[in-house]
Image: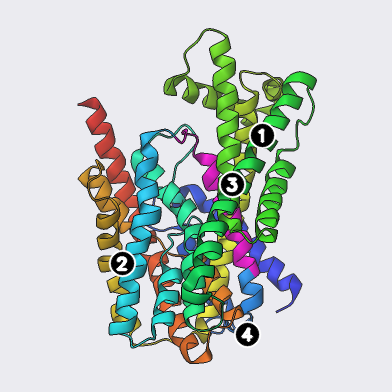
Amino acid sequence: MTFALWLAVGGALLLFMALSGSLLSRMPVSTSMLYLLAGLAVGPLGLALAAPRLVEHAGLLEHLTEVIVLLSLFTSGMKMSLGLHDQRWFPPLRLALGSMVATVALITLAGVALLGLPLGAAVLLGGILAPTDPVLATEVQVDHPADRDHLRFALTGEGGLNDGTAFPVVMLGLGLLGVHELGPLGWRWLLVDLLWATGAGIAIGAVLGTGLGRLVLYLRHRHQETTGYENFLALGLIGLAYGFAVLAHAYGFLAVFAAGLALRHSAKTATDAAVAALGVVPTARAEAAAENRVEQALHNPQTGQAEAMATDPRHGSAYMAHAVLNFNEQLDRMGEMVGVVVVGLLLWAVPWAQAALWFVPLMLLGVRPLSVAVGLAGSRVPPVQRRLIAWFGIRGIGSVYYLAYAINHGLPAQHMDTLVALTMAVVVSSIVVHGISVTPLMERYRRRRRAGRRA
């Protein structure tokens, strides 16, 4: 398949989405489902324009999915403007830690007892499939930084955090298979792969995001400089956070999510301080109103308000965060398209296993609800939100990344077909069943919320 033909196929798909996007948003069909069909159509199962194999192109697939997940993680962090002291952080933290550990344990048990896998391969399968996906979960994530919906906040936070917290599990699985050093009694894994890599990744991202946010706001407010380059700011911070984290042997995914979160938090702190200096108490309603004004200014540049807001102490921080988020959301959508098309393109060569016929329902209807019940046990999350959280455990590009990572880092050949088949089966099934159900279920949830507010 020539480069020109790739451009033609990609351009046709982009134009189709641009012309039909608003219509699709009202139908029980997700954009990911259409991208998956496009990949199938291009591959040997359709027009046979290309025939890549997952194992043969695992190196390229790893880096491609890595970039896509990084863009999505940064976007997720930028959407979450609540301070870390807010109690609404408890559900996503419990999901990203407790529910993820329960998911890994249940998948490991199924892998050993039902699939006959050795412990290392079963743990590795758990690490690959445990993280929910921030790339494909945009329909159930926070709509904008002022969104205070608990369900969306929980799913956004979980997807942003557990893509990084799954890395120690993957390293443990590779270590148990003998292709990664764990150290005597696992001390190296505990100290380096778990404690250091996790803590350092979060710290590096938080420091860079906070420092850069404060520097940019200082230059804008005091010297009216650094305006109009929000796209460079977003990509630069992603690259810096990820690069520094990996060089420090920390987890870059956590660093990028923390960087987006810290950049957004520094912007919110600056806005609250500027508003408080005027003798006004910052409120959620006032924040939402400010977000709306900034959004209108960004979408109507001819009014000249955007330039004034960029350097205004009351709106400059919100303007910076909104401009960065808008740019990154566009990249995120492009990444989703590329990633899912590639998944569809690879399906022709997947060594499908009969075990997927029962393993996929077990994952979606058994493992996910049980792990959510464990993670949220004793919390005040309402039953309706618990049920939706239990259903929307979307698997996608993050799992494909971890699968490619494992293949490139020594996954033994005798377990490769099983892990490839089960991972791709879960990802494709998630794209389809969650894509069909997301629109009607979330619309029903919104109606119930509106009815509750009126009551």
Q: Which residue type carries mark 1?
A: Gly
Determine which of the numbered discs, if any, sits on residue 411 in the image.
none
Precedes in sequence: disc 1 or disc 2: 1
- Residue visible at 76% across and 30% down in the picture: 227
Disc 4 marks a residue whose amino acid type is: Glu
Give how far apart the Cα atoms at labels 4 and 1 are: 42 Å
Mark 1 lies on a secondary structure that is: helix
First-in-chain label (1 vs 3): 3
Q: To which quarter of the image does residue 382 belong?
A: top left
Q: CA distance from mark 4 to mark 3?
A: 36 Å
Mark 4 or mark 3, earlier in chain: 4
User: Which residue is at a point 43% across and 24% down the rendered structure image?
Assistant: 284
- Three-letter amino acid code at disc 3? Ala
Relative depth, front residue between 44 and 78: 78
77 in magenta: yes
* Vertical position of residue 23 compared to residue 85: above or below: below
Instruction: Please report the residue visible at 61 percent of the width from the left and 37 percent of the height from the top.
Output: 263
Left-right relation of 282 to 95? right
Name the element at disc 4. loop
Callout 2 environment at 10 Å: few (<14), some (14 to 19), or many (20+)? many
Q: Quadrant of the N terminus?
A: bottom right
